[in-house]
Image: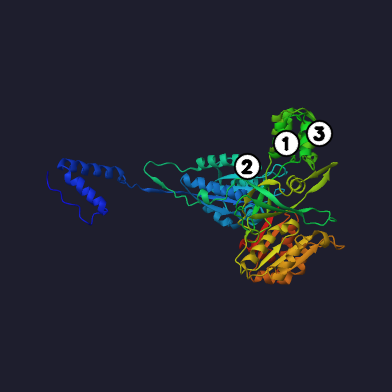
């Protein structure tokens, strides 16, 4: 046996291990030590990385994803496109229509456009400026560009997906080449949109080259940091009608508690509430179609299917399923749109009663979508709760009493102790500014909900900026929502000023836009000093009237031309100082 040198004290082993190794190796033969050395070397070699052969890297292909969004769905889909595009060898860039300079469009070689339609064929409010520029005579030529359009809409409206359709046609007029046919999505857009995105990116995919590698790094947030799309179960801890018993309105303050932490919401966010249909209406539909004994179908109609929406598409499906001659005549003679006005699915199946199968009735409906409500609380104030403000919608048409699906579900069938499903819907475009910045809040009716959250948040953090609220409703004595809270906020300084407009208290109706005009000098001074302006509530009339009042205030206070006053407000919007959350 040959002599074996003891391991030195500097060897990376403890004293006990070193002594044990000395004992084993000292007794080993040269052949044994040689075998052990080769064995250890082989293990190291098997775990070493293979030699790297560098090949020329091929730059990721640029892809511009342009979105026009009101409720956030188009923006979320744009983010989905970007995530998938990165994996497919693209370098995606997401552009909000609100930030788009039309002059930059010719620089984009590949365009994916996701556009929502608002109301009766209008673009989302934040997209109006760029949309108008795109449709105008000064829009640049786009030869050499390829594009694809995904349109979002609601078949309950006559101008279904009108904005997406118009953008699709306009890009072609300007010389761009349509790479993929447009898809028009209804409220149940998730599955068809996902399939279209996958197909579109495959069409746009850069050609593969065997000698090159695509450089593509996904910097998108990991799944763990994303907001969950799964609904949560919430318990009703407060259910209070904020209107007086003499009011002709019913506005419910709804406090929701959670088993654990509340969703990670911020002031300005919304909660989507998953409603259930009115059981009386469900039973009427089932009775009219001869399906009143189908309990499984009844359960599905209660919670999963939209049984109120009636559209031209519904009538077309009805004819396809039943061959009904009279309804076909409505369609052929162009009377369908006028007939469905103010009517619902129950009117169709009762007016033209024919036996239907469960499958046929399901074909006449679409999935029951959740309704989004602005969160009326700050977590810094209420902890692990979330508060909503819901006005019950009730009306009569064609001799039938009707109600809003979600609002009457909340008002009539949700009580304290009951549970419901909700899902967080972030709204990063309706966020509070720095605590030192002044804010102007305009929110009549339930539009005041996010501003309750704003004031609670600013009070909790001790914000130094001033705050000014414009609130309106019908009557001071019956409809002053959260009156005591606003008075307390004025006392503690978290609210600097409040201006009120109660339309039914005076012979001439007074709305928030009239108060804006009366306060126009102070309003413009606040804006000149950097205040940010927020509007929440009705989109059809209020939001437009408020914007017109602010344009008029600029024109009067600063002696501007109508064009210059409009430009001043447009600059507020472009600078993200004019925020809207309208419905």
- The label on residue 189 is 2
Colour approach in the figure: rainbow
In the image, 252 versus 267, the foreground residue is 252
Q: Residue at x 83, y 62 (%)?
A: 477
In-image side of 211 versus 443 (left or right): left
Q: In this orientation, does residue 202 appear?
A: yes
Could you give the CA–CA distance between mark 1 and mark 3, rounded to whole angstroms?
Answer: 14 Å
Relative to 543, residue 362 above or below: above
Is label 1 in contact with label 3 (beta carbons under 8 Å)? no
Of pointers 1 and 3, the one earlier in the residue sequence:
1
- Foreground: disc 1 or disc 3: 3
Q: Residue at x 69, y 70 (%)?
A: 492
Relative to 572, residue 327 above or below: above
Residue, disc 1 = 314
Could you give the CA–CA distance between mark 1 and mark 2, rounded to whole angstroms?
Answer: 17 Å
Judged from the image, the secondary structure of the residue bearing numbered disc 1 is helix
In-image side of 461 versus 87 (left or right): right
Of pointers 1 and 2, the one earlier in the residue sequence:
2
In the image, 462 versus 154, the foreground residue is 462
Residue, disc 3 = 350
In the image, 417 versus 539, the foreground residue is 417
- Rendered image quadrant of residue 136: bottom right
The percent coordinates of residue 19 (x first, y second) are 22, 51
- The quadrant of the rendering that contains the N terminus is top left
The percent coordinates of residue 244 (x first, y second) are 82, 57
Of pointers 2 and 3, the one earlier in the residue sequence:
2
The percent coordinates of residue 176 (x first, y second) are 56, 47
In-image side of 414 versus 197 (left or right): right
């Amino acid at each position: 046996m040959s002599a074996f040198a003891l391991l030195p004290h500097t060897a990376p082993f403890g004293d006990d291990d070193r002594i044990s190794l000395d004992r084993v190796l000292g007794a080993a033969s040269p052949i044994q030590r040689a075998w052990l050395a080769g064995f250890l070397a082989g293990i190291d070699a098997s775990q070493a990385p293979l030699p790297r052969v560098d090949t020329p890297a091929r730059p990721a292909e640029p892809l511009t994803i342009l979105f026009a969004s009101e409720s956030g769905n188009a923006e979320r889909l744009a983010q989905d496109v970007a995530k998938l595009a990165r994996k497919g060898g693209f370098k995606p860039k997401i552009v909000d229509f609100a930030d788009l300079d039309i002059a930059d469009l010719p620089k984009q070689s590949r365009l994916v456009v996701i556009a929502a339609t608002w109301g009766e064929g209008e673009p989302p409010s934040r997209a109006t400026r760029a949309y108008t520029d795109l449709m105008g005579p000064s829009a640049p030529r786009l030869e050499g560009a390829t594009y694809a359009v995904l349109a979002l809409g609601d078949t309950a409206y006559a101008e279904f997906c009108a904005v997406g359709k118009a953008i699709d046609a306009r890009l072609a007029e300007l010389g761009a080449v349509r790479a993929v046919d447009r898809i028009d999505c209804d409220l149940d857009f998730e599955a068809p949109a996902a399939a279209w995105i996958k197909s579109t990116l495959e069409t746009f995919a850069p050609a593969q080259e065997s000698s090159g590698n695509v450089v593509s790094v996904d910097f998108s947030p990991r799944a763990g940091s994303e907001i969950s799309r799964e609904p949560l179960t919430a318990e009703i801890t407060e259910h209070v009608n904020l209107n007086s018993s003499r009011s002709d309105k019913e506005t419910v303050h709804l406090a929701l508690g959670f088993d654990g932490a509340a969703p990670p919401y911020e002031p300005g966010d919304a909660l989507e509430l998953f409603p259930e249909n009115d059981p009386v209406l469900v039973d009427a539909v089932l009775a009219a179609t001869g399906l009143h004994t189908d309990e499984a179908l009844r359960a599905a109609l209660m919670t999963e299917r939209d049984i109120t929406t009636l559209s031209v598409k519904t009538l077309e499906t009805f004819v396809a399923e039943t061959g009904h001659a009279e309804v076909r005549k409505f369609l052929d003679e162009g009377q369908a749109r006028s007939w469905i006005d103010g009517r619902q699915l129950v009117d169709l199946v009762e007016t033209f009663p024919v036996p239907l199968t469960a499958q046929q009735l399901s074909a006449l409906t679409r999935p029951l979508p959740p309704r989004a409500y602005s969160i009326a609380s700050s977590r810094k104030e209420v902890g692990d709760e979330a508060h909503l403000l819901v006005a019950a919608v009730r009306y009569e048409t064609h001799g039938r009493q009707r109600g809003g699906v979600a609002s009457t579900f909340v008002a009539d069938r949700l009580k304290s102790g009951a549970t419901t499903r909700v899902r967080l819907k972030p709204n990063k475009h309706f966020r509070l500014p720095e605590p030192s910045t002044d804010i102007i809040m305009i929110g009549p009716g339930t539009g005041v909900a996010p501003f309750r959250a704003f004031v609670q948040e600013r009070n909790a953090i001790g914000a130094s900026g001033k705050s000014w609220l414009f609130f309106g409703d019908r009557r001071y004595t019956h409809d002053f929502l959260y009156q005591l809270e606003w008075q307390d906020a004025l006392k503690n300084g978290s609210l600097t000023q409040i201006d009120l407009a109660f339309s039914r208290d005076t012979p001439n109706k007074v709305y928030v836009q009239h108060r804006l005009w009366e306060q126009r000098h102070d309003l413009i001074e606040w804006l000149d000093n950097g205040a940010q302006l927020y509007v929440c509530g009705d989109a059809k009339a209020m939001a437009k009237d408020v914007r017109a009042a602010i344009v008029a205030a600029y024109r009067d206070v600063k002696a501007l031309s109508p064009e210059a006053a409009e430009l001043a407000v447009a600059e507020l919007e472009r600078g993200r100082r004019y925020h809207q959350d309208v419905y």
